[in-house]
Amino acid sequence: MYVTNPTDFRQTERTAFLGGAAAGGESSRTIAAGAFLFREGDSAQFVFEVQTGVLRLTRVLANGRRQVIAFGYPGDIVGFPDGDVHHADCDAITAAQVVVHQTAALKDARRFPEAHQKLLGAAIREISAMQDHFMTLGQKTVTEKMASFLLVLGDRVGTRLGEYTEFNLPMCRSDIADFLCISPETVSRTFTQFRRRNIIFVDQINRVVLLDRAQLLELSEQD
Amino acid sequence: MYVTNPTDFRQTERTAFLGGAAAGGESSRTIAAGAFLFREGDSAQFVFEVQTGVLRLTRVLANGRRQVIAFGYPGDIVGFPDGDVHHADCDAITAAQVVVHQTAALKDARRFPEAHQKLLGAAIREISAMQDHFMTLGQKTVTEKMASFLLVLGDRVGTRLGEYTEFNLPMCRSDIADFLCISPETVSRTFTQFRRRNIIFVDQINRVVLLDRAQLLELSEQD
DNA sequence: CGGGACTTTGACACCTCTCAACTCTCGTGG
DNA sequence: CCACGAGAGTTGAGAGGTGTCAAAGTCCCG
């Protein structure tokens, strides 16, 4: 999950990544909240398709600064290897279920054309989404980043409440901060600012209602 | 080409992307300096492997802000589509030669297992490099970004001059700025700072000699 | 009720951007 | 051969957004 223009995700394939056929030896797996799916440096034997729950991909710089590279929502693929190892940590923000797929399929298009095909599709969509995320990280102000983030989540996981959209924020403020490359304090300040302007409503700390989608859209691309 | 830890590129496959066999209908093509290979919105019929020269991938935000997503150096693949279209502009900074490969191969693993295989490999390496670039954009100061950038270029395209490394910077200052998400003035100031500290030597405006690689390395990861 | 983690809020500093002027390079044309 | 202009790069001054540090508030859970 990257912060992109909301429209981008409408093209995204949401169907189960692996069909019924055992194309490469997939199986299912459950991860408890807080548990790690893999860690940086682990041998990359599998890639994972998120079915339920939310995952978190992170990397840590030598000096301790942390980057949240992506959130893994249902439909996302996580675990594309760097060579033969994972080069990010992946843990579960909420309890999650994933489909496990052997990376062997990555290396043998002849034996697993079906799985291979879909993995390449997923990889290309990932590249596309990451390029969008570059725009967000590099060219946007804090307000624009937060507005984009809320819009994307609303579109991907929101439920309609009349003319409003409501959704959960399972990740903590500092996860959002490290994802958008800003400080947790600034995340908090921006939430407050949005609340004061009646753009969002936050009843519980991780439950958000988008009250004014139009204004959010404007804020997400303002000059 | 992304700004990553120099070590990452040693793993990168440098061999020609397409073997001798006509696996998907490739051909070669020359691009003049300044000419466009494709533009955002163009139907994505081909992906390209850079053989010689340097390409530039850019996107423009609605308000005119520009992001240089990547530089395409020999060995890089550019043009992974977003759906059926390109979602970035690509033009040549210097005259360049590319191998043209039909995107049909992206969609048919059965007919083009060889090409498909290599494309997936390239895509996965691309994802890996982009994740590194996130670290650079989000977590690094201007000095760290510039130091990382110079180190990567030195490793990828530098020639040894005794204990020094020399290379060309075919892109202009504002390209570097838009790639690293900083202002051109700041790029210039950082060059000056590096020159004054005898870390680099700049004889012509786009010819750089790394005098003190150790210090650059330190600057690229300082806390 | 107490402790701890997370969040919010405030004050302040500083890094980087913006704006502006100046310099340098290079190509053109008198 | 020199003057000129255009574009890129450099340098400086000032402003502002965001980070840092610190303290207070909130929530959850034992």
Image (cartoon, coloured by chain):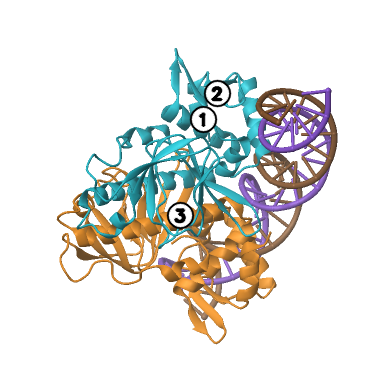
Chain colours: A cyan, B orange, C purple, D brown
Confirm whether circles 1 and 2 share one chain. yes
Quadrant including the N terminus of chain B: bottom left
- Report which residue position mark 2 lands on: A208
The amino acid type of the residue labelled 3 equals Met
| Residue A104 picture location, percent across and down | 31, 57
Place residue D2 in its image quadrant: bottom right
Dot 1 corresponds to which residue? A150
Q: Is residue A110 visible?
A: yes
Q: Is residue B188 above or below residue A26?
A: below
Q: Do callouts 1 and 2 mark residues in contact (Cβ within 8 Å)?
A: yes
How far apart in space, not on screen, are marks 1 and 2 (Cα)?
9 Å
Q: CA distance from mark 1 to mark 3?
A: 23 Å
Q: Disc 2 or disc 3, which is closer to the eye?
A: 2
Secondary structure under badge 2?
A: strand
Q: Position of residue A93 (x, y in %)?
A: 53, 38
Is label 1 in a helix, a strand or a loop? helix
Residue pictured at 35% horizontal, 45% vertical? A125
- Mark 1 or 2: the one toward you: 2
B18 over B107 or under it: above or below:
below
Q: Chain of mark 1?
A: A
Nearer to us in this view, B150 or B16: B16
- Residue contact between numbered discs 1 and 3, judged by CB atoms under 8 Å: no
Local packing at callout 1 (Cα closer than 10 Å; few below 14, some 14-19, many 20+) is many
Please give the chain letter of the residue carrying mark 2.
Answer: A
Q: Tag 3's secondary structure? A: helix
Which residue type carries mark 1?
Leu
Residue B130 - label: 3
Across and down, in percent, residue A156 comes to 42, 30
Q: Decide which of A19, B213 is in the foreground and name it.
A: A19
| Residue B114 falls in image quadrant | bottom left
Residue drawn at 42 percent across, 50 percent down: A79
Question: Please, which chain is the residue tagged with disc 3 on?
Answer: B
